[in-house]
């Protein structure tokens, strides 16, 4: 329900911001909308079968995580010209991370190698937004409010997203097996999704409103 409430808020607030920020805020609303829809479905899977809805969780992530990571490109595009390569590198890193995570969790690949490859995709994203072209453009071209939002979003990717590999480790690499630890696995993933997806959107909303108000005041 928190995801539903966030969706309504982000969509309503698109009417408050200037045109160049509407896409970023709309994407934030789409992320929470898709996540909310899948969580209603995953709840039914859990209630009816008692099994962790791994496949449906990854269907959600395959849609929402690329949208989240593209927000870095969108907020930079709102204030300066950004090379398309940044967009595609961020998408590649997100999909690489998710595909290998799924292969490990679904049993199509040994869990440890899959975990290592998935972590490599995550580290690639972190490199791009810190030391790569996206990080450099933010440092050189962005106003203070955008730089602040960009840094907060980076913190979510590093600290907030760290919850996911922790959940993977607890569920698959502790020797207990996912069947006996599925409750812990689901709690960890659920907490991470709510905090990270809504948190990302709130940061986007903050900078969008701030920059729009500044423009209106001129």
Image (spheres, grey):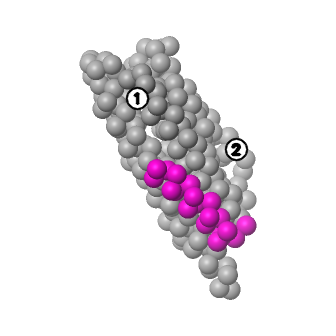
Asked if residue 93 can be seen in this view, the reply is no
Between 101 and 126, the one nearer to me in the picture: 101
Q: Which residue is found at the position 58% from the left and 47% from the top?
A: 33
Decide: marks 1, 2 in contact (CB < 8 A)?
A: no
Which residue range is magenta in the image?
1-19
When the figure is inspected, residue 71 is found, relative to residue 168, above or below; the finding is below
Between 15 and 207, the one nearer to me in the picture: 15
Magenta region includes residue 75: no
Q: Position of residue 73 (x, y in %)?
A: 64, 52
| The furthest residue to the front | 48
Q: Dot 2, crowdedness within 10 Å: few (<14), some or many (≥20)?
A: few
Magenta region includes residue 3: yes
Frontmost of labels 1 and 2 is 1
The secondary element bearing badge 2 is classed as: helix
Q: Which residue is found at the position 57% from the left and 74% from the top?
A: 210
The secondary element bearing badge 1 is classed as: helix
Residue 85 badge: 2
Q: Position of residue 9 (x, y in %)?
A: 55, 62
Left or right: 20 in relation to 102:
right
Q: Earlier in the sequence, mark 1 or mark 2?
A: 1
Asked if residue 181 can be seen in this view, the reply is yes
Residue 139 position by quadrant: bottom right
Q: Position of residue 125 (x, y in %)?
A: 53, 41
Q: Main secondary structure of the magenta part?
A: helix
Q: Dot 1, crowdedness within 10 Å: few (<14), some or many (≥20)?
A: few
Residue 7 badge: none
- Circle 1 is placed at which residue position? 47
Q: Which residue is found at the position 47% from the left and 18% from the top?
A: 106
| The furthest residue to the bottom | 218
Left or right: 212 in relation to 153:
right
Left or right: 44 in relation to 10:
left
């Amino acid at each position: 329900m928190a995801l539903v409430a966030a969706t309504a808020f982000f969509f309503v607030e698109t009417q408050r911001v200037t045109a160049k920020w509407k896409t970023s805020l709309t994407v934030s609303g789409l992320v929470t909308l898709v996540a909310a829809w899948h969580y209603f479905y995953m709840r039914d899977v859990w209630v009816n079968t008692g099994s962790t809805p791994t496949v449906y969780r990854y269907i959600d992530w395959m849609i929402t995580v690329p949208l989240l990571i593209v927000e870095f490109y969108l907020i930079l595009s709102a204030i300066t010209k950004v090379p398309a390569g940044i967009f595609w590198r961020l998408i590649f890193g997100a999909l690489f991370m998710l595909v290998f995570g799924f292969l490990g969790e679904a049993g199509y690949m040994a869990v440890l190698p899959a975990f290592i490859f998935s972590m490599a995709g995550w580290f690639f994203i972190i490199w791009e937004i810190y030391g790569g072209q996206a990080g450099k453009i933010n440092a050189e071209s962005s106003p203070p409010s955008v730089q602040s939002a960009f840094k907060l979003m980076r913190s979510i990717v590093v600290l907030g997203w760290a919850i996911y590999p922790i959940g993977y480790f607890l569920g698959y690499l502790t020797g207990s097996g996912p069947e006996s630890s599925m409750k812990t696995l689901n709690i960890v993933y659920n907490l991470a999704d709510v905090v990270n997806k809504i948190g990302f959107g709130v940061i986007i909303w903050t900078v969008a409103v701030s920059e729009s108000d500044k423009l209106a005041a001129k």
